[in-house]
């Protein structure tokens, strides 16, 4: 069964450093998403991406965040200068159509120290 | 502002019995609803969905009911199995963005 792949599974970084979280969505999917879940809290929407541009973003997705689809397979989330409160599980997701259920990756646990 | 609420943080059910997980929402524009299951250290897994034109959708042991007038949906699992033990999230959308509830942790006791 096709999977959404995320790397790394765990990333530890120092406050103020840049991190790039990587995702390989399912190959025939057209819509891509990043969500995050701070420990013990709900899953929160960050951004959706379609046709090589951001289609929606939440208030969380400020100037410190950016997304990119650098080639035909990868979808990345960059945090420019990490803060302690960025520590969370980050989930990538994709779907073939915006109205369909998502396929989520297994997540990247980001720890900012 | 929490548009999707799951008021029961946890639920325990005996194996073989019915599990009922509940979800309430506030935005009447929501027209698509999903349930996800999440095991520890894994991403959410899509379980079942329902659009606002229906009031019931069934897939094997899982049935989702939608009551639009009450802005309420529920997930029924019959019969419950120990492997169903996980955190269940409901989510709702009115476009490209989904709003998740905080989850209900289901424990199925063998």
Image (cartoon, coloured by chain):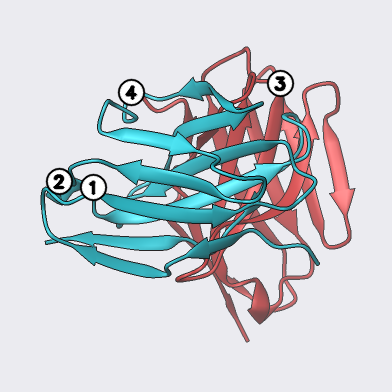
Chain colours: A cyan, B red
Residue indicated by mark 1 = A86
Pointer 2 and pointer 1: residues touching (CB < 8 Å)? yes
User: Can residue B6 be seen by looking at this rendering?
Assistant: no
Quadrant (top left/top right/bottom left/bottom right) for the N terminus of chain B: top left
Pointer 1 and pointer 3: residues touching (CB < 8 Å)? no
Residue indicated by mark 4 = A59
Position of residue B101 relative to residue B72, above or below, is below
Counting other residues with Cα less than 10 Å from the Cα at mark 3, is it few (<14), some (14-19), or many (20 or more)?
some
Are both tags, 4 and 3, on one chain? no
| Left or right: B51 in relation to A112 | right
Quadrant (top left/top right/bottom left/bottom right) for the C terminus of chain B: bottom right
Are both tags, 1 and 3, on one chain? no
Q: Residue furthest top?
A: B29
User: Separation of disc 2 and disc 3 at Cα?
Assistant: 36 Å
Front residue (pair A35, A28): A28
Residue indicated by mark 2 = A83
Identify which residue is drawn at 51% across, 67% down: B42
């Amino acid at each position: 069964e096709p999977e959404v792949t995320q790397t790394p599974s765990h990333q530890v970084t120092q406050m103020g450093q840049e991190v790039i979280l990587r995702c390989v969505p399912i190959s025939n999917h057209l819509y891509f998403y990043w969500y995050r879940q701070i420990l013990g809290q709900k899953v929160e929407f960050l951004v959706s991406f379609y046709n090589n541009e951001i289609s929606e973003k939440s208030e969380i997705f400020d100037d410190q965040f950016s997304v990119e689809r650098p080639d035909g397979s990868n979808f990345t989330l960059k945090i420019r200068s990490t803060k302690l409160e960025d520590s969370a599980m980050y989930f990538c997701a994709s779907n073939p159509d915006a109205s369909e259920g998502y396929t989520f990756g297994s997540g990247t646990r980001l720890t900012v120290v | 502002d929490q548009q999707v609420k799951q008021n029961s943080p946890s639920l325990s059910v005996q194996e073989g019995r019915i599990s009922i997980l509940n979800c309430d929402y506030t935005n009447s524009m929501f027209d698509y609803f999903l349930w996800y299951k999440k095991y520890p250290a894994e991403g959410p897994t899509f379980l079942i969905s329902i659009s606002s034109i229906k009031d019931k959708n069934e897939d094997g042991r899982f049935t989702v009911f939608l009551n639009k007038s009450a802005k309420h949906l529920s997930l029924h699992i019959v019969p419950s199995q120990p492997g169903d033990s996980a955190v269940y999230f409901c989510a709702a959308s009115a476009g490209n963005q989904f709003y998740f509830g905080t989850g209900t942790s289901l424990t199925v006791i063998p």
